[in-house]
Amino acid sequence: MKILAAAESALNEVERDSNSLRSKELREAIQQKIDEQREAIKALRRLYN
């Protein structure tokens, strides 16, 4: 579970960093990938619980 928490923390950091990008399309693409990864983390948490 510690690894999943670290992964979620890394996603939060990437999300903060991507907010400073000028390209709206790039920000949206990154946000979509972040959302996909968060869903994967949620699924893994359900498997471990």
Image (spheres, rainbow, N blue to C red):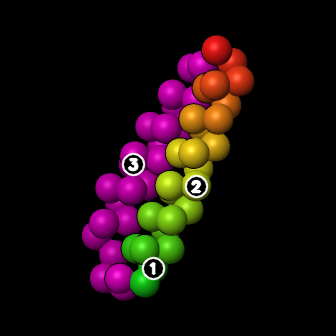
Q: Secondary structure at mark 1?
A: helix
Q: Is residue 40 left or right of residue 9?
A: right
Quarter that holds the C terminus:
top right
| Residue ID for mark 1 | 26
Q: Secondary structure at mark 3?
A: helix
Q: Residue furthest right?
A: 47
**Eye-nearest disc, 2 or 3:** 2
Which residue occupies 57% across, 35% down? 42
Q: Position of residue 31 (x, y in %)?
A: 45, 64
- Identify which amino acid the numbered label 1 is placed on: Leu
Q: Quadrant of residue 44?
A: top right
Determine crowd level at label 3: few under 14, some 14-19, many 20+ residues with C-alpha closer than 10 A: few
Residue 12 belongs to magenta span: yes
| Residue ID for mark 2 | 36
Q: Earlier in the sequence, mark 3 or mark 1?
A: 3
Q: Position of residue 15 (x, y in %)?
A: 39, 56
Q: Position of residue 38 (x, y in %)?
A: 53, 45
Question: Nearest the camera: 19 or 40?
Answer: 40
Q: Is residue 22 left or right of residue 40?
A: left
Question: Nearest the camera: 8 or 46?
Answer: 46
Determine crowd level at label 1: few under 14, some 14-19, many 20+ residues with C-alpha closer than 10 A: few
Tell me where the magenta segment starts and ends, as one range.
1-24
Q: Is residue 43 left or right of residue 26?
A: right
Quarter that holds the N terminus:
top right
- Identify which amino acid the numbered label 3 is placed on: Glu
> Is the C-beta separation of discs 1 and 2 under 8 Å?
no
Q: Position of residue 5 (x, y in %)?
A: 51, 28
Q: Secondary structure at mark 2?
A: helix
| Mark number displayed over residue 18 | none
| Residue ID for mark 3 | 13
Image vertical order of residue 17 relative to residue 27, above or below: above
Image vertical order of residue 28 relative to residue 12, above or below: below
